[in-house]
Image (cartoon, grey):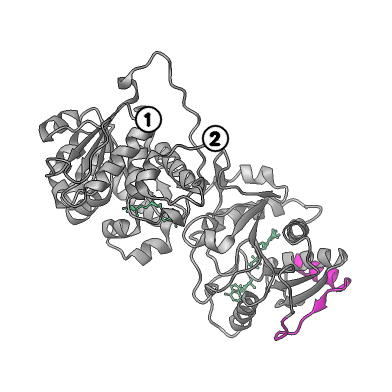
């Protein structure tokens, strides 16, 4: 069992529900001693002792399926270790799986107390509550059998103690990180600590949308199935950082590429400056900023390091620079898009460039055609911008973030970085990435502009867009994760921040 740290130095494979089932089925074709369920339950009990070492009591909520079976095994171990263990089991010994039946028999030989449906153990903040109600097999149901399970779950939210979800929190969608209707925990739920032990595989839904809030600390036990995992291609990757880049001694400012930022219409100059500042501070050889219809800096003194080309001069840089187009661009950015799409070899489209694209479908072909010319494009929509491009609602995008990002990437033949908690990076023909870094302190104006600048600075000519987007999102989030608690996080400071070594 290992804890999944956001700042792990390598990417990690994730498997969705279908792929996890395939791995489980493949593993079950060979006799396992001990069984996977025994290993799972043992791991849950071990985690309970780790996160709640002072616990005298455990409340184990076991559902009707194999997730409940894992809970029964854990309950037996905890009872044998001297805890007072209360168990709710919603299963039926006549219909449950053989493994769950064995787990039930095993638990009956211990001191666990079998709780009646309406009983609620009285726990202290040191005790532990184990949610083994539903795992991979959960689905939206509103029949009479579903009601007691939901009521039990809601009662557990009112209980004190440390919380451990087995495999995934009950009601959290494995693949999308959204809540099934009626399962969202109340805002007031504040367990002593919150943990999820993902079994066999790590799943995408744990890391995006509501996943991170739902799961708390994520732990993983592969149940000694490494061989089977290696045979199933991942459904997604949890991103890791870029490998350390070394600058050759024999280099000059032209070695690291020009970044040209086009944006900052009147009233929104700051957005373009933020993107340019981030590019400057993250290693662009030269950073050029062309402001749209804003002839001079009367309000914001620019950084002296920036070059400020006029429109003609900026046009002259399009064919060789990495271009960031759209930050604070307003309506004026639309006029630039045909030339930018035609010429820029590496292009980041953000904010108003995305809105222009959503309004004007004639530009879509120009985006799609870039790929065949060897020009690469990264779109960085937040969920509302993605919704406009997909002609969907924001709620629809957020309900299936991986699908939304992939659809947009396939439609426009480019890389899409769908922002928000657990940003998604999708490209045609590539396995999507989910970014594990970042936190709600980033939910302020301007941090997306900073991301666009970091992306451009990190995008050396030979790097594929998919990898660049994944690594830049990782770095952007890690900067926020390292931010000192006592220091305000504002976008202009974020643009200038450097990652400390991990
Ligand atoms: N196989 C193995 O060896 C291993 C399995 N492992 C463990 O098994 C878990 C998967 O087990 P699982 O397939 O039995 O599914 P599970 O999540 O327990 O739920 C299915 C049951 O719940 C019911 N149900 C569904 N939704 C409902 C709702 N809303 N409200 C009420 N009821 C609902 C559903 O009823 P149905 O809808 O089918 O009528 C069915 O009875 C996995 O997450 C991991 O923990 C690990 O130990 C590794 C080894
Ligand atoms: N709760 C959060 N957790 C992690 N990252 C977040 C969160 N909220 C916002 N972010 C990140 O902050 C950035 C905000 O970008 P965006 O919405 O475009 O803001 P703006 O347009 O004001 O710059 C994105 O990179 C997004 O992924």
Give the residues drawn in magenta, as a range: 98-120
Residue at x 37% of width, y 66% of height: 395
Residue bearing the label numbered 1: 283
Q: Is residue 179 left or right of residue 107?
A: left
Residue 199 drawn at (x, y percent): 66, 56
Distance from the alpha carbon under mark 2 to that under mark 1: 17 Å
Q: In this view, does 422 lie to the left or right of 330?
A: right
Residue bearing the label numbered 2: 501
**Mark 1 vs ligand 2: CB below 8 Å:** no
* Quarter where residue 66 is shown: bottom right
Image height check: is 19 above or below 172?
above
In this orientation, which residue lies closer to the viewer: 186 or 362? 186
**Mark 2 vs ligand 2: CB below 8 Å:** no
Image height check: is 312 above or below 253?
below
Residue at x 81% of width, y 69% of height: 56
User: Quick one: SS at disc 1?
Assistant: loop
Residue 96 drawn at (x, y percent): 72, 72
């Amino acid at each position: 069992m290992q804890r999944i740290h956001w700042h792990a130095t390598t990417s990690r494979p994730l498997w969705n529900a279908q792929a996890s089932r395939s791995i489980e089925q493949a593993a079950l074709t060979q006799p396992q001693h001990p069984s996977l369920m025994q290993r799972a339950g043992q791991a849950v009990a071990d985690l309970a002792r780790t996160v709640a070492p002072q616990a005298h009591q455990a409340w184990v909520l076991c559902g009707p399926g194999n997730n409940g079976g894992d809970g029964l095994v854990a309950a037996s171990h905890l009872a044998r270790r001297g805890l007072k263990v209360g168990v709710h089991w919603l299963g039926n010994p006549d219909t449950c799986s053989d493994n769950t039946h064995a787990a039930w028999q095993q638990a009956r030989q211990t001191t666990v107390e079998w709780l009646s449906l309406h009983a609620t153990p009285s726990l202290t903040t040191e005790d532990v509550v184990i949610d083994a109600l539903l795992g991979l097999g959960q689905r939206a149901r509103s029949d009479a059998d579903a009601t007691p399970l939901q009521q039990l779950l809601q009662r557990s939210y009112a209980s004190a103690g440390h919380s451990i979800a087995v495999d995934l929190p009950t009601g959290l969608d494995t693949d999308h990180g959204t809540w099934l209707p009626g399962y969202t925990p109340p805002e007031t739920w504040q367990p002593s600590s919150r943990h999820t032990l993902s079994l066999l595989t790590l799943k995408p839904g744990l890391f995006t949308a509501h996943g991170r809030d739902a799961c708390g600390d994520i732990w993983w036990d592969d149940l000694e199935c490494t061989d089977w995992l290696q045979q199933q291609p991942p459904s997604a990757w949890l991103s890791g950082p870029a490998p350390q880049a070394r600058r050759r001694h024999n280099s000059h400012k032209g070695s690291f590429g020009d970044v040209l930022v086009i944006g900052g219409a009147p009233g929104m100059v700051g957005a373009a400056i933020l993107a340019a500042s981030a590019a400057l501070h993250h290693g662009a050889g030269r950073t050029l900023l062309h402001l749209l219809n804003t002839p001079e800096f009367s309000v914001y003194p620019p950084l002296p390091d920036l070059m400020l080309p006029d429109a003609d001069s900026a046009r002259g840089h399009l064919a060789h620079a990495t271009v960031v187009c759209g930050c604070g661009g307003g309506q004026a950015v639309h006029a630039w898009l045909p030339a930018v799409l035609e010429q820029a070899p590496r292009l980041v489209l953000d904010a108003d460039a995305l809105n222009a694209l959503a309004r004007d479908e004639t530009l879509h072909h120009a985006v799609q055609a870039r790929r065949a010319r060897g020009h690469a494009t990264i779109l960085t929509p937040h969920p509302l911008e993605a919704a406009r491009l997909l002609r969907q609602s924001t709620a629809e995008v957020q309900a299936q973030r991986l699908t939304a990002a992939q659809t947009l990437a396939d439609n426009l033949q480019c890389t899409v970085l769908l922002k928000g908690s657990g940003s998604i990076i999708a490209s045609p023909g590539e396995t999507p990435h989910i970014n594990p870094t970042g936190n709600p302190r980033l939910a302020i104006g301007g941090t997306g502009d900073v991301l666009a600048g970091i992306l451009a600075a990190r995008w050396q000519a030979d790097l594929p867009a998919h990898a660049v987007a994944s690594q830049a999102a990782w770095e952007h989030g890690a900067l926020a994760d390292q931010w000192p608690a006592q220091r305000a996080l504002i976008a202009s400071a974020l643009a200038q921040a450097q990652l400390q070594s991990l």
